Every structure is written in structure tokens, then in C-alpha cells.
Image (cartoon, rainbow, N blue to C red):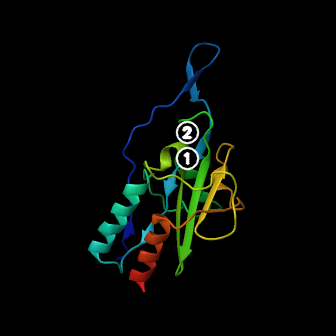
């Protein structure tokens, strides 16, 4: 039986809403980003390693809901990925991606809500070509673009987690 590492997002978010001309609340104002974490097959990983993996992730990130198509923005089913209204007026959408040993791990969300203090990305400006990939963009739902540039971030827990998972599967 194939098991999947699934994490659930459990914190509530406050959002700003816009009043329409008739005074009714409409969609929240501001930037909207895809909000998910990919699922990793962990059938060959022992329980202690799974617990360590979860602790590392929850320490650095506010974990979004898992989705089977989070890593594949070109899939038809990607349209069912949850969307998040960003908290800050000058926010950015983020896509974190790492590939190792045939595994691909992706996290998407708003910059203002994805990282737990004191963690934060090293570079919030552009995207580059070296793994693990971290990318920022400023238009709604832009973190789904498969051609979205990439930003390399310095040695981090994200890299360590994927390396740990890759090593344990082999």
C-alpha cells in the first residue's frame, strides 16, 4: 500500500474584503496565490524519519493543505488546488521546489504566511536556475506558471529535508 505524507493546514487567516457598490462584501482585496504542498510517497521510510520530516517542515513553514497535483500546475486537476488571499498589501506568491532521486517536492503560498519566524527567504527579488528552487512573483495566481523563473536560496532546512527523504528511500 502506498502511503502519502499529507499535512493539513489548520490556522485561520484574516483577510481584507472589498465592499461592492451595493454594500455587500465581495472577494478579498489584494494578491491571491495557489496554496498547497505536494504529497511524497513515503512507503519505504520508517516512522521515525517521517516524524522528523514533519517536525522539520512544521518548524520552518506554515504548512498549506496537501494536494496530489500541487507539483503539476499543467494537470487539469491543478484547478482544484486551494487559493490563498495574501495578508500583506505588498505581498508575493512563492513556489518552492526541489527534485532529488526521482522525487519532486513543491510548496506554494503567500510569502507573508508561508514562513515561520525567524525563517525567511534569502532573496525575494528574482528567480535563478540552481536547486533547490525558490521563486517569487507579484500577480495573482502567478505561482502556478511552470515557466516561472527560479530563485536559489542558501543552504536551508528545505534542502536537508529532501536530501533526507531521498537518502531514506534508496
- Quadrant of the rendering where the N terminus is positioned: bottom left
Residue 112: percent from left, percent from top? 53, 43
Looking at the image, which is closer to me, 72 or 132? 132
Describe the element under mark 1 as helix, strand or loop. Answer: helix
Looking at the image, which is closer to me, 41 or 129? 129
For label 2, the crowd category at 10 Å Cα-Cα, with few meaning under 14, some 14 to 19 and many 20 or more, is many
Describe the element under mark 2 as helix, strand or loop. Answer: loop
**Would you place residue 124 above or below residue 128 in this image?**
above
For label 1, the crowd category at 10 Å Cα-Cα, with few meaning under 14, some 14 to 19 and many 20 or more, is many
> Is the residue under label 2 in contact with that under label 1 (CB below 8 Å)?
yes
Residue 105: percent from left, percent from top? 51, 67
Give the label on residue 12, or none.
none
Residue that appears at 40% across and 38% down: 12
> In which quarter of the view is residue 28 placed?
top right
| Residue that label 2 marks | 86
Looking at the image, which is closer to me, 20 or 54? 54
**Would you place residue 24 above or below residue 133 in this image?**
above
Residue that appears at 45% across and 71% down: 160
- Quadrant of the rendering where the C terminus is positioned: bottom left
Left or right: 11 with respect to 17? left
| Residue that label 1 marks | 111
Residue that appears at 27% across and 73% down: 47
Marks 1/2: CA–CA distance:
8 Å
Residue 87: percent from left, percent from top? 53, 36
Amino acid at each position: 500500500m502506498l502511503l502519502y505524507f499529507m499535512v493539513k493546514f489548520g490556522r485561520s487567516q484574516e483577510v481584507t474584503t472589498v465592499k461592492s457598490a451595493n454594500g455587500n462584501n465581495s472577494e478579498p482585496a489584494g494578491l491571491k496565490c495557489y496554496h498547497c504542498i505536494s504529497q511524497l510517497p513515503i512507503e519505504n521510510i520508517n516512522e521515525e524519519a517521517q516524524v522528523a520530516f514533519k517536525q522539520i517542515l512544521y518548524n520552518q513553514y506554515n504548512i498549506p493543505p496537501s494536494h496530489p497535483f500541487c507539483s503539476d500546475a499543467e494537470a487539469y486537476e491543478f484547478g482544484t488546488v486551494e487559493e490563498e488571499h495574501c495578508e500583506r498589501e505588498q505581498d508575493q506568491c512563492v513556489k518552492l521546489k526541489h527534485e532529488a532521486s526521482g522525487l519532486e517536492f513543491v510548496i506554494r503560498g503567500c510569502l507573508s504566511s508561508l514562513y515561520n519566524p525567524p525563517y525567511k527567504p534569502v532573496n525575494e527579488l528574482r528567480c535563478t536556475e540552481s536547486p533547490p528552487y525558490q521563486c517569487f512573483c507579484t500577480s495573482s495566481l502567478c505561482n502556478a506558471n511552470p515557466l516561472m523563473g527560479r530563485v536559489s536560496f542558501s543552504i536551508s532546512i528545505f534542502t536537508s529535508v529532501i536530501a533526507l527523504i531521498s537518502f531514506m528511500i534508496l
